[in-house]
Image: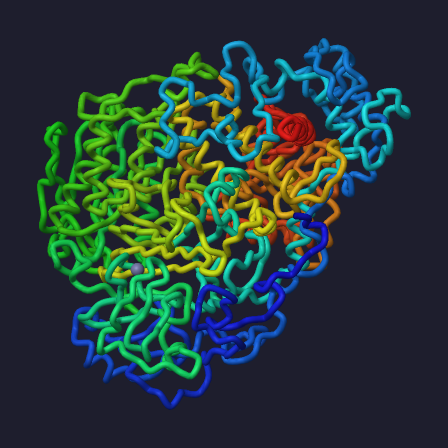
Amino acid sequence: MSQQGYVATPPYSQAQPGIGGYPTGFGASPPQAHYGHYGAPPQPYTAQAAGVLKPAASSPSGMPPPPVSSQYGSPIQQNGAHSQKFPPPAVSAPAMPPYGQPLQRPAYQSMAQATPPTQQMTNQMSAMSIGGYGQGPLQSPQSPTSSAAPQPYQMPSAPAMGHPPMSPTGHQPPSMSACPPMTAGPPMGATGAPPMGMPNSQPGLPPMGGGGFQQPGGPQGFPQQPGYIPVIAGPYGGQMPGSQMAGPQAGAFAGGFPGGAAHMAGPPQKKLDPDSIPSTTQVIEDDQAKRGGQLYTTNLRGQVPPLVTTSFTVQDQGNASPRFMRCTTYSFPCSSDLAKQCQVPLATIIKPFATVPKNETPLYVVNHGEAGPIRCNRCKAYMCPFMLFIDGGRRYQCSFCNCVNEVPVQYFQHLDHMGRRVDLYERPELSLGSYEFTATLDYCKNNKPPNPPAYIFMIDVSYNNIKSGLVKLICEELKTLLDRLPKEEGAESSSIKVGFVTYNKILHFYNVKSALAQPQMMVVSDVAEMFVPLLDGFLVNFQESRAVINNLLDQIPDMFADTNESETVFAPVIQAGVEALKAAECSGKLFIFHSSLPTAEAPGKLKNRDDRKLVNTEKEKILFQPQRGVYEQLTKDCVAQGCCVDLFVFPNQYVDMATMGDIPTHTGGSVYKYSNFQVQIDGEHFLTDLRRDVEKSIGFDAIMRVRTSTGFRATDFFGAIYMNNTTDVEMAAVDCDKAVTVEFKHDDALNEEAGALIQCALLYTSISGQRRLRVHNLSLNCSSQLSELYKSCETDALINFFAKSAYHAILNQPVKTVREILVKQTAHMLACYRKHCASPSAASQLILPDAMKVFPVYMNSLMKTPVLVGSAELSTDERNFHRLSVMSTGVEESQILLYPRLIPLHSMDVVNEAVPAAVRCSEERLSETGVFLLDNGQNLFLWLGQACPPDLIQSLFNVPSLAHLSPDMTSLPELDNAQSKKLRSIICAISQQRPHSMKMVIVKQKDKPEMLFRQHLVEDKGLHGGASYIDFLCYVHREIRQLLT
Ligand SMILES: [Zn+2]
């Protein structure tokens, strides 16, 4: 089917607001739009609002908070006390149409305009000079003519390939062949490498579907497509048929070179215009221009949201906000055959606690009293907008499993003439995509309401940490930070209790009971049998014990000032934390501040196993695998207790990050790493992280279930999670930054009418100790046309999925195999589009689906990350740290990490508030006279060109020239001039968007630290291996052509 001409389909062509707007699949939906009643006067039907409704986070104006004691109290009394209707959303920004009004052209309408869904590379490359490319390095000198010539490609010698025609100006010569792009070691596909289509032959490879990395490209991947020929030749380098080399230049660039497909004797060589290949910055800008600043209403099934980089306002009208759930595609293929054919992963990235901006409505909390939430009898799905009421309102059909359920008497409500409950808009669970239920005792451990959680601060007081001043820094900070523990909206103070432990080879517990004049220390030196020596007085309320705690925090640095103990334990520290929470019968979080490999004699003792000779071998996976034994059991204990572990590590050398970070990343925790920590330089960076971590919104002792409508199900889960079985996602805690990526597989055919429904239900304990259920619902389209799937893809979500699944796969498979699978799958997804969805055109043209046109640059960037690049130059801890931090990230973070923002500052308009438009991440874009800021969500680099104007340096740094600039500077001086103010405001704005504090690194052009900066220029050839964007694109194009041959 051709996608050249945009064909509007129902969801896009009609404004169908409200729940009734589901175009299909909801049989009783009204044929015409009936608008909701948010904010509208109360209806005559005032069937009792069966519960207290309030936003979970902050009350919309006019909404009184429910009584604190209401959680397990009588629902009837609550109803009496709060008889008001479902309150109007807090959102009252004039730009947003109230729910009760006909919608103006909603945001999605714009998708129906303008760009056709298919973007031809040739269009974009019209400016490209083809002739030069034709004789560029990609050309096989041996086979200049035929596009079907069978002779093997002879790798030209490096000098021959070193000439620069394809090279962007002044850029390092690209290198399809001079330097095998994908690896620092042997080229992919070289001797010893398995054929790419057959990684399953690798020993140790998990079976498909078993949580391992799926093998996409092999012969079995093409069952319905006899036309596809599985590739068996090695990829890069190796045995490329020469004919294929004609592909890129004859193909991608044929548009500007009519008739010259494979003829080498073209016009004189010219440089390839780097502007001509799909640009991420352009895609981001276009989406911002088209959909930025708009209201995004979630009333339509299968609606593709704006990009994560676009700023927009969400109004929940029956589907979860994209802040909570984003999908790789919003149109699932109807059959598993189609899914296999296209190999586009079907996945959703769920961030259940995502921060909701102040101008959007926080989640309502629904309290059904002792009866608890209404659930389907068969599949246990929670009441949601997808349920279909029938039989005059006495029964409802579950849209997930089709079971017909009785409506409980107290929940009964009449239906209107269109079959909708008349209280539809008074009940969040009937009209909104996301909401919360208060859980009954049935949802609590041992049928007892939980206690409020506790935070335990566990400080390594060994020699290094004392000497560096870290211990003093932490203790000073805690004195003020503990006043900012998160609290329930409206509460006077936080319910979270706090406790303190210090340790080196032994552990010291502190009694900080408010009645004491002085804190008391209790020492446990038998770390093999960890126990908590005191119960009363260990976990306390900070407000009550403030004096004793401050006294303790003053004393700790002095107590250990003369220590010469450099050995530490680690596992017993976590064990102690779990035992303390167990004794207090609560969940909570451990904040561990640790600096060295735990080598002291104790359970969980670690040794240096940093063997970089394993890099690029079959055994490389060992470097990523954590040590098991004690740590495995400890993970289970933590999860069972709802004990989240946050690790702040300050290493001067190898610390076995793979093992030490394993418990945090299975308990919803975070790992922070500050190598070679110096208080002066890194102190503020660390403290900012600590503050954010302590203050952020979080739920504890969480368990998540992802339910789906019939025909497909959730099969694989990636995140800071623990899975005891195949369905329950356990998280000791889940905070606003943690995302779980869930992959779906078909187990039957899907129905275009019914669509694909997903319900994510998260049971958790709130910071005040309430047990709650947070429910997110999302409805997707289904289609038997793959073109619909490709049209509804989201590249940022796709790359999040690929990053996590690849980073998971390397635990079991050689890194090289994983990279090969990624390349294969990329080519396959694009080839399938080409074959089934694009208009007929010359095989030599590279045609990309519009929604995936920058997918290759992200994929190439992913393969150049420290984890996948396979370079022995990189520290094993750094690779593991990177791996662990990506496993729980949401789409926003993986996007910026894999395509950093490079902002030119030298020409910024100081009057205008806007941040200057980003440029492509390539050295090509830098200029000697320029100043650039690079933000990848983890680091912030300020790059200064050698010849950047002294007056700009003066304005920003208050020094006369670059030579006077201290390399240790990590923040800008506060100077009273326009440039300084503007740059500081840009940095401040960027920092606030990111979950982590970003240390600013000043990079002078040609100075040594420039290497650190350059590895983030993801369009260029990787410093540690890996292709440039353009080389990768050409390579993928060749692969596609092979698949299509
Ligand atoms: Zn059901």
The answer to which quarter of the image holds residue 509 is top left
Closer to the camera in the image, 196 or 429 = 196
Q: Position of residue 336 (x, y in %)?
A: 46, 43
The residue shown at (44%, 87%) is: 41
The residue shown at (39%, 65%) is: 386
The residue shown at (53%, 30%) is: 822
Q: Is residue 1032 above or below residue 544?
A: above
Q: Residue furthest right?
A: 267
Q: Is residue 591 visible?
A: no
Q: Is residue 253 left or right of residue 361?
A: right
Q: Position of residue 473 (x, y in %)?
A: 35, 41
Q: Position of residue 218 (x, y in %)?
A: 50, 26
Q: Is residue 475 above or below residue 131?
A: below
Q: Residue furthest bottom?
A: 44
Q: Is residue 466 left or right of residue 886?
A: left
Q: Is residue 711 left or right of residue 817?
A: left
Q: Position of residue 810 (x, y in %)?
A: 42, 26
Closer to the camera in the image, 507 or 769 = 769
Q: Quadrant of ligand 1?
A: bottom left
The answer to which quarter of the image holds residue 305 is bottom right
The residue shown at (56%, 18%) is: 188
Closer to the camera in the image, 343 or 664 = 343
Q: Is residue 539 visible?
A: yes
The answer to which quarter of the image holds residue 95 is bottom right
